Amino acid sequence: MTLYEYNALNEDEKARATWDSVLVSDREDVDHRILLYQVDAFYVEVYYNKKLNAITKFRSFSSTELLVPYLDKINLIKLLNE
């Protein structure tokens, strides 16, 4: 699947495609727990709103610059072994 194909999916289809991929890392901000997945050759952040107890956004991207907030948490050895 390409990034463009993913972006054309509805929210339920995005959720299924994301859950079937590789969880890379996570992080938190004040309101969200943000899970980072690798889906084929791109990445998806899943924003889980802690107060609402719900997923509020899927953010897909291919730019490695957006991985910076995760770099100290990503276990490269684990990823290479999967």
Image: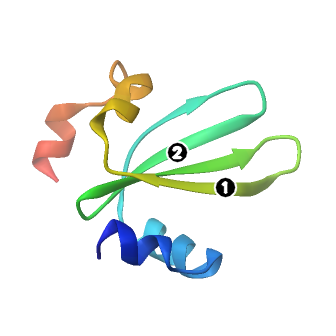
Q: Position of residue 42 (x, y in %)?
A: 30, 56
| Residue type at numbered disc 2 | Leu
Q: What quarter of the picture does the C terminus occupy?
A: bottom left
Does the residue at mark 2 contact the one at mark 1 (Cβ under 8 Å)? no
Query: Is the residue marked by circle 2 packed among few (<14), some (14-19), or many (20+) residues within 10 Å?
Result: some
Q: Which mark is residue 65?
A: none
Q: Position of residue 27 (x, y in %)?
A: 54, 30
Q: What quarter of the picture does the N terminus occupy?
A: bottom left
Q: Residue at x 63, y 74 (%)?
A: 11
Q: 46 or 6: nearer the eye?
A: 6
Query: Residue pushed farthest top?
Result: 72
| Residue type at numbered disc 1 | Lys
Q: Which residue is mark 2?
A: 35
Q: How many marks?
A: 2
Query: Is the residue marked by circle 1 packed among few (<14), some (14-19), or many (20+) residues within 10 Å?
Result: some
Viewed as shown, does residue 57 lie left or right of 15?
right
Q: Position of residue 20 (x, y in %)?
A: 40, 71
Q: Residue at x 23, y 59 (%)?
A: 41
Give the mark nearest the N terminus, 2 or 1: 2
Q: Residue at x 51, y 77 (%)?
A: 16
Query: Residue pushed farthest right?
Result: 52
Disc 1 is placed on an element classified as: strand
Q: Which residue is mark 1?
A: 57
Q: Position of residue 26 (x, y in %)?
A: 49, 36
Disc 2 is placed on an element classified as: strand
Q: Residue at x 53, y 73 (%)?
A: 14
As displayed, is residue 24 above or below residue 57? Answer: above
- The image quadrant of residue 38 is bottom left
Q: 77 or 34: nearer the eye?
A: 34
Q: CA distance from mark 2 to mark 1?
A: 11 Å
Which coloring applies here? Answer: rainbow
Q: 67 or 72: nearer the eye?
A: 67
